[in-house]
Structures are given as structure tokens and as C-alpha cells.
Image (spheres, coloured by chain):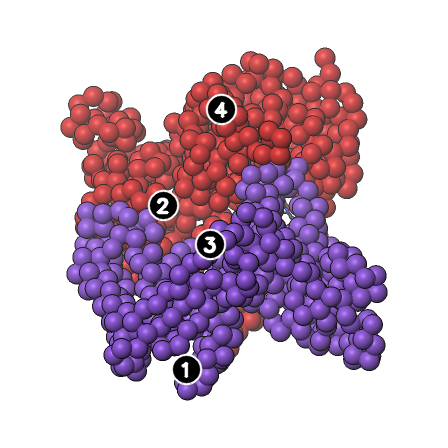
Chain colours: A red, B purple
């Protein structure tokens, strides 16, 4: 049988980078094919070539045995290719309906037929369990729902070759499981899927076959039934990766972050945080566990001065910083790794070295009075790029040209490289490969042991279970339980995240088994 | 906005306090307006004075005679000051739910008070002011519409002024030479369109800084029109007598009292404006093209991934936008005085841009803002007629007033930035 899709010898060069080096890939009909590789390995580049956004320097594309030129997304869409991009491709001020129909509009005469499209969206969302209100503006949607809109966009165009570039990076485990159900049902209808993820567990659970790319080259291809996590990790990174972290017990000190009865509104003016209180001490990691959309985003934004607090108090290192500006809060020694790296973490057109000093540029050695010291900024950048293994031809290129994971590393490098008292990390390893996750986890623990207070928000329960000393479960804008991480099992935390009380959870689910926990990636 | 409509007190102490402070600031402002009416106007009027506003067109033909509005000056001013004061007190004590509307109302009251005071013991044709305001607003509104077209697709058009100037000159030349005034209009549209092509190529293809490209066009247009004007138009009257569009009363509509003479007894260019505003609104929010335009202005890459041709959308929008500026330019010559003079547009293109911003990048908003600016022009012109003794204020100050009010109203409408997210940013395709 001819494969649905065949890529032959695809090569793509960017200035200073060989992003794809004679890559071959075949996709069979009704197959889920995982693409695995380090940050910057060239996965997104390859998919963008397939979708017509980039033009390959060499190589051919065959669709159902036919050699095909894909000169732009229009060609790709015509060939039945649909792509969910690594970073959202949604117009925030437009409604869901408008976003979905854009480029493929239904019209009655001259007038957009919003009703018909909204009906189609409702039908698609019902059939696949992708719940979304077609009439809401995208800017008012949570990240998880935006991802659903992206998938609806593709299904709306009846794609039969589906590319998903790290679709689960922004999803909760539950949402990811729902997505897998959808993908499996699409596969049974004959849709062929290319699936990119850094989560080996997902790849093994979902994919039929996996291709591993390293530094632009295919280094292996195997059916998933013959693969395991350790083997895939090694293939990807080129060395053995520790999938577990050794964690000495914490030695908590003074309270660094304390907030009481916090109330914060979301964009739709609902109380997203509704009376939350918590203390984080120096030298401990407090993990905030919760299903996405229970106020974690708004909480972190309030703590970092990005969103007004309606009621309650926040103190950092003894100083009242309720409704203080982000600058004041940063000056208190707070580091922030934001949830949405492109929105809140980086100035995309700026070079890497400027992004690395974007909240310290006015301090010596980066500035003397009014004058910026470019040399000091450049040197700092060289050092951090080395230290954090940011894959880039130079620190002078715009951050926008980095791969998603390497953009994340720039933020982590910036926030971890200055003296801090408190680290607020929201999804710090989102989109990172296993090797980088290992590295960043080690750095966070290092910070803890140096006496930094860490507030870790993560949708990855495994990350929370593996790193946190205490776990605060967030449910409907409140902390329903704050427990020592050793005293609960993953299942018990899961139950509490779904709304059970601590007593109920402790009574039902299995007890924690071992002290040494594992971070499964 | 939404914060004011939500029951702030229920949300917590900070929200309540912040809302309260804002509410009091509004109230104090209303009280200040009341005080200003009292100090500036009431104290400078005497009991027994009357202000007369005529509400009929100056021409003879009319179907329904509207009686003149005659009000006792001092009493009216006292009532206006009192009302503004009451609104202020209520705002401080209780607070209005839609305070921005009240702010607009208070601003309006101030303008009304000013007018009542200015025509004490005299009369003024209010209808005439409004009719003139619509005419004066026309080029500004065309400028705003041109801006809306371009900027909604993500290209800043600061060259509206230059496009208008060119259009104004070409209109008069072609109209003079052919004797066909409609050809003049067509020439204005086409010549401005050519400049639009130039701007589009510079901004979209060569990704030149759009402000610089626009400024270059403005300088070029000013230079070339001044040169042609001095060299040919002034010495050769045959080239500079294009005639003007006659006023055309729309049957029926123009007979409606008050509204009719203001809006429906104007030149075809004004009607073209109404049509343009409605069309742009329709196209922007109801058609495929409009959806794509807005998407391209906000997030061109997202549009690109769905197969929307970002460049094509921008080219077409910029060129059409330029043509609209050209119609606005034609107004200055064949729409009003019939001849071209150097720099005849007098910065109206830039004011059009301001109107677009004040109107938050919407066609009707821009039109409304243009009307306010037009009203300011009209007021200033008419008050000069009343004389220095009557209105002892330098005319420059009168000119500032409407802009000031608009800015205050807009500052009150604290909203998010509304400029399209990709406005002014060239799109780079990989
Ligand atoms: N537009 C561009 N200009 C210059 N270099 C680029 C561009 N896009 C990607 N690159 C470079 O190409 C390489 C591959 O990037 P790509 O985005 O394909 O990686 P990836 O495998 O998707 O990584 P990640 O898992 O982090 O998303 C990187 O070194 C990146 O810096
Ligand atoms: Mg990628």
C-alpha cells in the first residue's frame, strides 16, 4: 500500500543552522506517527515545510504516491493537510466562530453566515466532546479551550492528514486524555496523524510508530510496541537521562511569600481566585496542584503584579506588595516564569541578549546610570546561552527564531540567573525535552537548597509530586488542602483536584508507597 | 467598563475603593463644570437677556416652519449650572452606573451653556451651524475612513494629508479641463490611489518604516502641488476653475424639520461620505473581506496559516483607503470653493487620523468624531461673525475647546488599547 504521505530528503537551512538534514518520513493511512526530538531538533521546521509555511531547500513531498508541490497553506489545506501549531494561531479579538471560518468562510450572498458556522462548530464539538461556546471571543478563553478551538479549526476543514505540534503542552492530563480519545476515533475513521510531543508516556500510549530526530537528522524509527521510555530518551538526547530526581528533605526557614484571602477576577469578571491563603517558606517548594482553570493563572498574575487584586493581602519578604507594580515585585527578589512564554515572557522581535536582561537592564553591570553597557549584556548572554544550553547560532538573533523549547530556556535562564528570594514558576518545563526538564528540575532544587522559596504551579501532576515539599490543592479559586508531599499519593491528590476533601481522599485512594518519587516525563 | 457594571462592593475591598475613588473624581469634574458655567457665563450675563436660536434654513423653500428657540439667557445658564452641579453631587454621593454617558451629557451641557451665553441678546442660526458642521466634517471623515481601511489591515497611513492634497488638485484640473465635474472626482480618486500603490509597495513589499514612507508621500505631495499651483494654476485661470458640486436636496428627507436641512441638503460628496461610512461598516463586520482584513490587522501569521493572502488584503485595503482619501481631497476644491490653493487641505488629513483614533478604528466612531471636529470649525466660524465684544475670547481658544472635550471624554472611557495588534508592523513571510 502506498503511504499517505512521504517526505524524501527534506533539507532546510536557516542562517547558521541546518534545521533539517535530509529527513525521510513516511506516514501510513490511519496511523498515528509520533515525532520525537530535543528542543531545536527541527520538528516544527519539518512540519512547517509540510504545511507550506517554509520552503525546503531540497527534498520532495509525495502525497498518496503523487509528487506534490506545497507552496503555501492553501495548497496544504487543499491536499487535506491540517495543522495545529505549536503556538496558537488564533486572533484574540475575534470570536471562536470567526476564527474557525477564517480563510474558509460560509457566506450568504455577501454576508458572513455566522449562524451556519456556529452550528457546524456545535456539531463538531458535540461529536468529539470538544466543548466550546462559538460566540465567545478567543481572548476570553483559557489556554485549554483555545487548544480545542485549534482542533475544531482543523476538523472544520475536513483534514485527513493531521499535524499536531505539541498539542498537549498546554493541556491538563484530563484534557490530554480527551484529546487522545478524539485522535484515536479520528484514526479509526482513516485519518492519518503526525503527533509531536516531548512526553514519552504520551507517545508510547498513543502512537503506532515513532521517528526520532536529533540535530536535524533522523536517528531512528521504531514501532512503539518495541520501545520504552528510557530507550526513547536516550535516542533523543544521545545520552542516558535520569528520569527521576533525588531530593533531600527540605529545610524550611522564614516565610517569604504569604497571601491571605486573596480575591482576583478573570477576564470575564468572574471571581477566579476566591479567598485563597497560603504561605511559602524559604527553602521549600510548594506545588500548586489543580485542574487548569481553577484560578491558578489568575493567582500567579496577581502575585506578580500583572492583575489587580480585588481583596486580601500579599506580602513578600515582610513587605506588603498587594497591587504593587511588577517592577516593585521584581525588585523584591521575585522571579517569574510565566505560563504563556510568548505573551508574558519574551519580546519576540528582540535579540536573545536583550531578552535575558529585560528586567535587570537598568542595574549595574548592564547599565551605568543612563547608559546601557552592551558589552556586559552580551557577555552575560553568551554565558547563559552556554549554561542553559540554548540551541541557537548566536545570542544576537531574535528570540522569535528559536524553537519553542529554547524560547522557554531563555526565560528560565533569565529568571534563575539573578539573586532571588522567591521563584514563582508557572509550568516551568512546558514544551521542554526530557534532557532539559531534568536540567531545570535540578536547577529549581538547587535554588530551593540555597534558601529560595519556590511556588510551583504545574498541570503535570508528576512534576508536582516529584518536586514539591508541600502540595496545595487548588479547587474553584480556593486551596482546599495543603499537605506534606510525603503524606499523600498521586491518586489522592488527583481526587482532591476533582473536589474531594482531604478526609475523603485519604480514606479512599491508595496510600503513598515509596519516599523516593519519580518524575515521569 | 465591565467593572463599573459589576457590583464592585461585592468583589472586595480594593475593587470597591478603586471604583469609589474613580467615581468621586468624575463627580468632582462635573462640579467643576458647573462652577465654570457659573463663573464664566452666569456672572457675565444680565437678567432679562434673551438668546435666540433660529432653527430654519436660511433659504426660502421649506415645508414646515419651525419656530425659533428663544430662551432667557441667565435663567437657562443657571439651570444648566444647577443641573451639572446636581449630577456632580449625585455622582459623588451615589454614583451613576453608566458614568461615561453622564460625562458626555455634562460636556454637552457645557457647550450649550457656552452657546447660550455667546448669543445673549442676539440670535444665531443653529441649523446653519450644524449644516456647516456636516460640511466641515466631510473631509475629516473621509480621512478617518481612509485610516480605518488601512489600519484595520495593519498598515499605518499617515499620508492621508498628502493623498487629499493631490486629490484636491487633480480634481480641479481635470474638472476644469474636461468641464465634467464627475471626471474631476474620478481623477482625485485615481491620483490618490496611485500614491496608495506607492505607500503599499513601500510598506508591504519593501517593509519600509510606514511613518517614514507616509511622511515622504506627504512632503512629495506638498511640494509637487505647490509647484504646479504656482507655476500653472495661479497664472492660468482656465486650469483652476473646476466649478463645484451643487447642493442636491434629497426629496422627502430634506423636508424633515431640523434633520433634513442638516444632512439631506448637501453636495453629492457628502452623500458619498454617508454611503462610504455605511459600506465600510458593512464590509468590515459582515463580509468575508472584512473578517480577513481584521484578522490580518491583528494576527497576520494566524491568517496566513489558514491560507489568507496577507499581502493581497493589505494591498487592496491600502489602495482603496487611499482612494477614499482622494474623495476627501476633492471636497476641498470641487466640493466647496471650486479652486485650488497651496496647502488647501490645512492638516485636515491628520485631523482625520485623530478622528479615526477617537472613533476607536470604527467607521461610525470615526464619523462621529469627525462631526465633533466639524462642529468645532463651524462654531468658531459663526462666533467670529458675532464679534469681539460679544465673545471676548481669542478664536484659537474656541478652536481648542471641542478637542479638549473629546480628549476628556476619551480619557474617561478608559479602555484597552484598541489599535489593531499588528498595526504598522510589516509581515515577513518565511
Ligand atoms: N524562522 C527561523 N529563522 C532562523 N532559524 C530558525 C527559524 N525557525 C527555526 N529556526 C532554527 O531551526 C532549528 C529548529 O527549530 P524547530 O523550531 O524546528 O525545533 P523543534 O524541534 O520544533 O524544537 P521544540 O521542541 O523546542 O519546539 C532551531 O535551531 C531554530 O533556532
Ligand atoms: Mg517546535
> Which chain's residue wears label 2?
A
For the question of whether residue B347 can be seen, the reply is yes
Q: Secondary structure at mark 3?
A: loop
Provide residue A23's location: percent of width, then percent of height.
71, 34
Q: Name the one closer to the observer, B24 or A295.
A: B24
- Find the distance from the CA under tag 4 to the CA under tag 3: 52 Å
Residue matched to label 1: B391
| Mark earlier in primary sequence (4, 2) | 4
Q: Quadrant of residue B334?
A: bottom right
Question: How many C-alpha atoms fall within 10 Å of the one at disc 1: few (<14), some, or many (≥20)?
Answer: some
Distance Cα–Cα, label 4 vs label 1: 62 Å
Query: Marks 4 and 2: same chain?
Result: yes
Judging by the rendered image, the residue that carries numbered circle 4 is A119
Residue at mark 3 to residue at mark 2: CA–CA distance: 53 Å
Determine which of the numbered discs, if any, sits on residue A267 in the image: 2
For label 4, the SS is: helix
Confirm whether circles 3 and 1 share one chain.
yes
Amino acid at each position: 500500500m502506498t503511504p499517505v504521505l512521504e517526505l524524501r530528503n527534506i533539507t532546510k537551512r536557516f542562517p547558521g543552522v541546518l534545521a533539517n538534514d535530509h529527513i525521510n518520513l513516511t506516514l501510513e493511512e490511519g496511523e498515528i506517527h509520533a515525532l520525537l526530538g530535543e528542543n531545536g531538533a527541527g520538528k516544527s521546521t519539518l512540519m512547517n515545510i509540510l504545511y507550506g509555511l517554509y520552503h525546503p531547500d531540497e527534498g520532495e513531498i509525495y502525497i498518496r504516491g503523487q509528487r506534490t508541490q506545497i507552496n503555501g497553506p492553501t495548497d496544504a489545506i487543499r491536499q487535506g493537510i491540517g495543522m495545529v501549531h505549536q503556538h496558537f494561531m488564533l486572533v484574540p479579538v475575534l470570536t471562536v466562530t470567526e476564527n474557525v471560518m477564517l480563510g474558509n468562510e460560509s457566506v450568504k450572498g455577501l454576508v458572513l453566515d455566522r449562524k451556519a458556522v456556529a452550528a457546524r462548530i456545535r456539531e463538531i464539538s458535540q461529536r468529539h466532546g470538544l466543548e466550546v461556546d462559538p460566540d465567545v471571543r478567543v481572548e476570553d478563553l483559557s489556554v485549554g479551550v483555545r487548544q480545542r478551538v485549534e482542533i475544531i479549526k482543523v476538523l472544520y476543514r475536513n483534514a485527513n492528514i493531521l499535524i499536531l505540534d505539541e498539542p498537549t503542552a498546554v493541556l491538563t492530563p484530563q484534557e490530554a486524555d480527551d484529546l487522545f480519545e478524539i485522535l484515536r476515533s479520528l484514526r479509526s475513521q482513516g485519518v492519518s496523524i503526525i503527533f509531536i510531543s516531548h512526553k514519552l508516556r504520551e507517545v508510547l500510549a498513543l502512537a503506532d510508530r515513532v521517528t526520532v530526530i536529533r540535530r536535524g537528522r533522523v536517528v531512528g524509527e521504531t514501532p512503539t510496541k518495541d520501545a520504552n521510555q528510557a530507550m526513547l530518551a536516550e535516542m533523543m538526547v544521545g545520552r542516558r537521562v535520569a528520569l527521576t530526581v533525588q531530593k533531600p528533605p527540605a529545610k524550611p526557614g522564614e516565610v517569604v511569600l504569604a497571601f491571605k484571602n486573596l480575591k482576583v477576577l478573570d477576564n470575564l469578571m468572574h471571581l477566579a481566585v476566591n479567598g485563597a491563603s497560603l504561605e511559602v517558606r524559604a527553602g521549600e517548594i510548594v506545588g500548586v496542584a489543580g485542574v487548569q482553570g481553577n484560578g491558578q493563572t489568575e493567582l500567579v498574575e496577581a502575585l506578580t503584579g500583572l492583575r489587580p487584586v480585588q481583596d486580601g493581602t500579599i506580602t513578600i519578604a515582610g513587605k506588603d506588595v498587594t497591587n504593587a507594580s511588577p517592577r516593585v515585585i521584581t525588585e523584591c527578589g521575585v522571579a517569574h516564569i510565566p505560563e504563556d512564554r510568548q505573551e508574558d515572557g519574551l519580546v519576540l522581535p528582540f535579540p536573545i541578549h536583550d531578552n535575558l536582561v529585560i528586567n535587570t537592564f537598568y542595574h549595574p553591570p548592564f547599565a551605568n546610570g543612563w547608559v546601557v553597557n552592551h558589552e556586559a549584556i552580551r557577555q552575560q548572554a553568551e554565558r547563559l546561552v552556554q549554561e542553559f544550553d540554548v540551541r541557537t547560532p548566536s545570542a544576537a538573533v531574535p528570540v522569535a527564531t528559536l524553537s519553542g523549547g529554547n524560547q522557554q530556556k531563555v526565560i528560565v535562564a533569565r529568571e534563575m540567573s539573578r539573586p532571588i528570594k522567591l521563584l514563582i514558576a508557572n509550568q516551568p518545563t512546558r514544551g521542554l525535552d526530557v534532557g532539559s526538564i531534568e536540567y531545570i528540575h535540578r536547577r529549581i532544587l538547587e535554588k530551593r537548597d540555597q534558601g529560595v522559596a519556590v511556588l510551583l504551579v504545574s498541570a503535570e501532576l508528576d512534576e508536582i509530586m516529584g518536586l514539591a515539599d508541600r502540595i496545595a490543592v487548588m479547587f474553584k479559586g480556593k486551596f482546599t488542602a495543603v499537605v506534606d508531599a510525603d503524606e499523600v499519593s498521586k491518586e489522592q491528590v488527583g481526587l482532591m483536584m476533582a473536589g474531594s476533601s482531604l478526609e475523603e481522599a485519604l480514606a479512599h485512594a491508595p496510600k503513598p508507597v515509596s519516599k523516593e518519587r519519580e518524575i515521569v516525563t | 467598563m465591565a467593572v463599573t457594571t459589576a457590583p464592585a462592593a461585592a468583589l472586595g475591598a480594593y475593587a470597591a475603593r478603586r471604583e469609589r475613588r474613580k467615581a468621586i473624581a468624575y463627580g468632582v469634574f462635573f462640579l467643576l463644570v458647573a462652577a465654570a458655567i457659573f463663573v464664566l457665563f452666569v456672572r457675565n450675563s444680565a437678567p432679562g437677556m434673551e438668546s435666540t436660536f433660529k432653527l430654519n434654513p436660511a433659504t426660502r423653500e421649506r415645508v414646515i416652519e419651525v419656530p425659533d428657540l428663544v430662551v432667557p439667557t441667565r435663567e437657562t445658564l443657571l439651570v444648566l449650572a444647577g443641573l451639572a452641579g446636581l449630577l456632580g453631587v449625585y455622582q459623588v454621593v451615589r454614583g451613576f452606573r453608566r458614568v461615561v454617558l453622564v460625562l458626555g451629557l455634562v460636556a454637552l451641557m457645557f457647550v450649550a451653556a457656552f452657546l447660550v451665553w455667546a448669543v445673549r441678546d442676539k440670535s444665531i442660526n443653529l441649523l446653519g451651524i450644524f449644516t456647516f458642521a456636516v460640511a466641515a466634517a466631510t473631509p475629516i471623515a473621509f480621512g478617518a475612513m481612509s485610516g480605518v481601511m488601512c489600519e484595520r489591515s495593519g498598515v499605518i497611513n499617515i499620508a492621508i494629508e498628502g493623498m487629499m492634497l493631490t486629490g484636491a488638485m487633480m480634481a480641479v484640473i481635470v474638472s476644469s479641463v474636461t468641464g465634467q465635474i464627475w471626471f474631476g472626482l474620478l481623477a482625485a480618486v485615481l491620483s490618490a490611489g496611485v500614491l496608495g500603490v506607492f505607500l503599499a509597495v513601500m510598506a508591504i513589499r519593501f517593509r519600509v518604516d510606514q511613518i517614514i514612507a507616509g511622511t515622504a508621500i506627504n512632503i512629495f505631495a506638498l511640494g509637487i502641488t505647490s509647484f504646479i499651483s504656482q507655476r500653472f494654476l495661479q497664472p492660468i485661470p482656465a486650469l483652476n476653475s473646476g466649478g463645484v458640486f451643487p447642493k442636491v436636496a434629497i426629496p422627502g428627507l430634506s423636508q424633515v424639520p431640523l434633520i433634513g436641512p442638516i444632512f439631506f441638503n448637501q453636495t453629492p460628496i457628502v452623500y458619498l461620505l454617508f454611503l462610504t461610512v455605511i459600506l465600510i461598516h458593512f464590509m468590515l463586520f459582515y463580509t468575508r473581506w472584512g473578517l480577513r482584513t481584521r484578522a490580518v490587522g491583528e494576527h497576520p501569521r494566524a491568517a496566513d496559516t489558514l491560507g489568507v493572502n496577507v499581502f493581497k488584503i493589505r494591498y487592496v485595503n491600502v489602495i482603496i483607503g487611499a482612494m477614499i482619501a482622494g474623495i476627501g481631497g476633492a471636497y476641498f476644491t470641487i466640493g466647496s470653493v471650486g479652486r485650488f490653493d497651496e496647502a488647501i487641505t490645512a492638516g485636515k488629513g491628520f485631523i482625520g487620523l485623530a478622528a479615526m483614533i477617537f472613533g476607536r478604528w470604527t467607521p461610525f466612531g470615526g464619523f462621529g468624531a469627525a462631526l465633533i471636529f466639524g462642529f468645532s470649525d463651524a462654531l468658531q466660524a459663526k462666533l467670529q461673525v458675532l464679534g469681539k465684544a460679544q465673545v471676548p475670547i481669542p478664536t484659537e481658544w474656541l478652536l481648542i475647546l471641542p478637542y479638549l472635550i473629546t480628549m476628556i471624554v476619551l480619557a474617561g472611557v478608559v479602555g484597552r488599547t484598541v489599535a489593531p495588534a499588528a498595526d504598522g508592523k510589516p509581515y515577513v513571510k518565511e
